[in-house]
Amino acid sequence: MAEHLASIFGTEKDRVNCPFYFKIGACRHGDRCSRLHNRPTISPTILLANMYQRPDMITPGVDSQGQPIDPRKIQEHFEDFYEDIFEELSKFGEIESLNVCDNLADHMIGNVYVQFREEDQAAAALQALQGRFYSGRPIIAEFSPVTDFREATCRQFEENNCNRGGYCNFMHVKVIGRELRKRLFGRYRTYRGSRSRSISPRHRRDKEFRDRDHDRDDYYRDRNGRRHDRFDRDSGGRRRHGSPRRSRSPPPAREGSEERRARIEQWNREREEKM
């Protein structure tokens, strides 16, 4: 019995646990779901719910005033947001992946998934995000059960033939440009391969987050064209962030679906033995 339950855990055959929450960390039924949402107490992945607000949220390709928007401007707006999030959260540790949903359903629209190399880095980032705002909106952050985004993303969308559109139940991940990806994620390859005592990647752009005397929540460009971030600050005008010390221990092996099911099966066996 225990083996059978473990084999169907997180699948459509599982009548107890929600398969969509297990795979994508979100469910369209929310708290009204008839199946259990097993929220993790620790995870290398954190979810920032509904955080990305695209400029054409009401009508695709049109702004709030009803004016058409150049697709290049939409992409530039997204990449500015992506870089903001990456630079802020990379202070807490190495980011393995950062995925932003392009779905339109309420439970997935604008969801941001940040997967760190180590769980303690994700925990530090989650703690620092509590009570903070971005673009005037509160940040809703929590641990996510998603550790394998291959199971969470829509393969048809990646092949440009998803017939469900923005209301698909699997992730439609927005794509950033090659140059930005190389600049953000390429630093880790440089950092690992370098033997010189160069500055840590997470401190490389700290100068862009100096104390400022403005009180805007949104980012802006000054007269010289420099972009300023839109994260909030504490009451003393200082940015609220931490830079936890990196763990010197080797990172734990990433656990996939099969390993998690095997671990649940082992728990069930141990529970039956005790009974």
Image (cartoon, grey):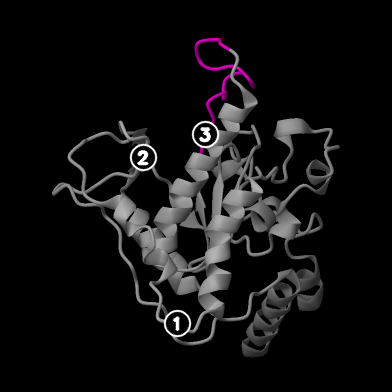
What's the distance in space between the residues labelled 2 and 3, CA to CA?
15 Å
What's the distance in space between the residues labelled 1 and 3, CA to CA?
36 Å
The picture places residue 38, in percent across and down from the top left corner, at 58, 61
Rendered-image quadrant of the C terminus? bottom right
Q: Is residue 203 left or right of residue 233?
A: right
User: Residue 61 versus residue 270: which sits nearer the camera?
Assistant: 61
| Label 2 or label 1, whichever comes before in sequence order | 1
When the figure is inspected, residue 127 is found, relative to residue 49, above or below; the finding is below
Q: Is residue 60 left or right of residue 134?
A: right
Q: Is residue 184 magenta?
A: no
Which secondary structure, mark 3? helix
Q: Amino acid at mark 3?
A: His
| Label 1 or label 3, whichever comes before in sequence order | 3
**Residue occupying the point 56% across, 11% down:** 67
The picture places residue 2, in percent across and down from the top left corner, at 76, 77
Q: Which residue is identified by label 1?
A: 196
Which disc, if any, is residue 226?
2
When the figure is inspected, residue 141 is found, relative to residue 115, above or below; the finding is above
Q: Amino acid at mark 2?
A: Arg
Q: Main secondary structure of the magenta part?
A: loop
Q: Is residue 144 visible?
A: no
**Residue occupying the point 50% across, 33% down:** 53
**Residue, far left:** 236
Q: Nearer the viewer, mark 2 or mark 3?
A: 2
Q: Is residue 65 left or right of residue 146?
A: left
Q: Which residue is identified by label 3?
A: 77
Task: Kindly indicate the quadrant of the structure image that contains residue 27.
Answer: top right
Which secondary structure, mark 1? loop
The picture places residue 15, in percent across and down from the top left corner, at 75, 56
Query: Where does the magenta region start and end?
Result: 52-67
